[in-house]
């Protein structure tokens, strides 16, 4: 339930009233009985508490490191091992010899 600010137009008394959103606004000052006006308040700031509101907000350091490593491996093609190089060169040699 919100807190509303009121100000008496007769005596100038400022006060707050904790009311339901559906409740009628006050019309009389509790001090002098004069007319009151509900003021436009700034409201309160929203406070988010918990373990995160987006999936990626509060990831662990190990998760972030794994994702970074995965991303980096996609950028550069894997290096060929010496065994793969030998197989490729022997296949190229046998292809040219059979032609």
Image: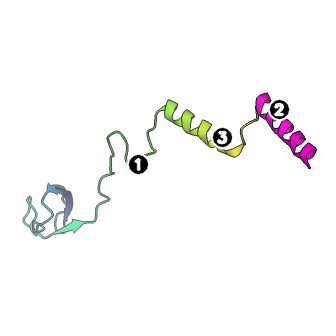
Give the CA distance from mark 3 to mark 1: 24 Å
Residue matched to label 2: 86
Could you say where residue 34 lies in the image, as x and y percent from the top left?
10, 68
Eyeballing the image, is 8 above or below 44?
below
Q: Please give left or right for residue 44 compared with residue 94 in the image.
A: left
Quarter of the image for residue 52 reads top left
Determine which of the numbered discs, if any, sits on residue 72 in the image: 3
Q: Nearer the viewer, mark 3 or mark 1?
A: 3
Dot 3: what SS? helix
Residue pictured at 69% horizontal, 45% vertical: 75
User: Residue 43 versus residue 51: which sits nearer the camera?
Assistant: 51
Eyeballing the image, is 35 above or below 31?
below
Residue matched to label 1: 54
Q: Which residues are magenta?
A: 82-99
User: Residue 36 versus residue 18: which sits nearer the camera?
Assistant: 18
Could you say where residue 64 lies in the image, as x and y percent from the top left?
53, 36
């Amino acid at each position: 339930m919100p807190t509303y600010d009121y100000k008496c137009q007769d005596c100038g008394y400022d006060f707050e009233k904790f009311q339901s959103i559906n409740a009628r606004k006050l019309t009389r000052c509790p001090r002098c009985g004069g007319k009151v006006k509900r003021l436009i308040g700034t409201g309160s700031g929203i406070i988010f508490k918990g373990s995160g509101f987006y999936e990626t907000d509060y990831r662990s350091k190990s998760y972030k490191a794994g994702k970074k490593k995965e991303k980096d491996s996609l950028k550069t093609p894997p290096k060929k091992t010496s065994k793969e190089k030998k197989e490729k060169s022997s296949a190229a040699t046998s292809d040219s010899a059979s032609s």
